[in-house]
Amino acid sequence: MEIYVPGAGGARPLVPVSPAALEAKAARAMKPEAAAYIIGGAGTEATIAANRAAFDRHRLAPRVLRDVSRRDLSVELFGRRHSAPILLAPIGVLELVHPQADLAVARAAAAEGIGMVFSNQASVAMETCATAMENKPRWFQLYWSSDDAFVRSLLGRAEKSGCEAIVVTLDTTLLGWRPRDLDLGYLPFLRGLGLAQYLSDPVFRSQIPADPPATATQVRGFQIVSTALTLRRKGREFGLTMNRMRAAVAHFVATYSRPDLTWSDIARLRGMTKLPIVLKGIRHAEDARMAKDHGVDGIVVSNHGGRQVDGEGATLDALPRVVEAAEGITVLLDSGIRSGSDVAKALALGARAVLLGRPYVYGLAIAGEAGAREVIRNMIAEFDLTLALSGLTSAADLNPGCLAEKP
Ligand code: FNR
């Protein structure tokens, strides 16, 4: 009714309601390199297609003549009640699509009462976003740097910022093969974007050489070049000179990833934080079992929205076996969620909640905070309707019996 009633007077929604139209409008609103980075995926993008195909293959089997006049969408995650089984996925470099970036998203999430996972590659420091969210739920996503002192510093900051879980992303110890970005020769981090958690960190800052050389810097075969406008703006924001900013990017490139990360590091992480630990990027049942054996609190079945391994299977197809192997620890799912109906299918197959990725970025690109907010609102409204029209009154009632037999 929030749409139809104003619609009778000629008003139209701020962002397209249909997922395809939303993506198309956002693509037009973004610069080409931003659209490539946000929308694109690994290789032939077969995994992006597979994620969607799995949602399309699974069908709901609604029941009728049940009293659905009152519904409860809430779910409990790590001792905290969330008003809907949807959190915003960690998405880096949001300054590519809107100047207010993560801050606009944090405000949108808080206004709609859902949780947000702060990205390690954010464009706004976690403390600023946390303040904007007041007491609403937020988690921190970690990319495990090769520098443990920096990792400890991030964990401490996340705890102080009121984050309620640490999400360790495991599918991106190396950056995937992404033709759209490769064709443009474009990687935002090399231009100083998406580095707010680093530049606001005392440990990271203390490691940037105080007086770096003025020439372009070579690290791991990358040449760090200055893109004057952006770096100058960011340089001022974080109180760094151009030279020091260039050195900061070089230090980031040298330390951002740890391809040698193993299960023993996850065991070590237990001693580094009191917060629940969630492993993001689990797709194999055996890894789910190992996660459980290592005492983690949750996992996110994710293939990074099809951005890492081209040709791997859909997360929704992996979900049932992962849930079985994870035996009782909290399982979330992302990659390809585009509608409230998708949320219902993921929950029916055993996910406790989902992470919403690209769609909220599309809302942000089109209409800033209000656009992100409308995307979230639409997603929750459609999930609520799907539940009711399936004859259910609670998100917790979704189970495999709510799905049709596969053809
Ligand atoms: C991501 N994702 C991601 N994940 C993460 O753990 N840290 C990050 O910084 C990012 N950054 C990021 C940037 C962009 C542009 C995209 C599209 C994705 C992955 C993200 O958290 C999530 O797993 C996917 O976006 C889910 O897939 P959908 O919903 O986008 O299909």
Image (tube, grey):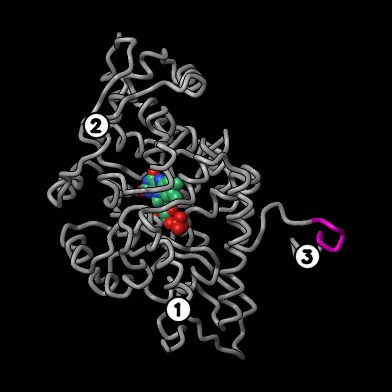
Q: Which residues are magenta?
A: 6-11
Which residue is the site of mark 1?
Answer: 57
Q: Tell whether label 3 touches label 1 (CB within 8 Å).
A: no
Q: Is residue 67 visible?
A: yes
The three-letter code of the residue at mark 2 reads Thr
Q: Is residue 102 visible?
A: no
The three-letter code of the residue at mark 1 reads Arg
Residue 147, image quadrant: top left
**Relative to 217, 114 lies left or right:** right
Look at discs 2 and 3 and give the one toward the viewer.
2
Front residue of 17/89: it is: 17
Q: Residue furthest left?
A: 264
Residue 351, image quadrant: bottom left
Mark sitting earlier along the chain (2/1): 1
Mark sitting earlier along the chain (1/3): 3
Which residue is the site of mark 3?
Answer: 4
Mark sitting earlier along the chain (2/3): 3
Look at discs 2 and 1 and give the one toward the viewer.
1
Which residue is the site of mark 2?
Answer: 255
Q: Residue at x 39, y 75 (%)?
A: 349
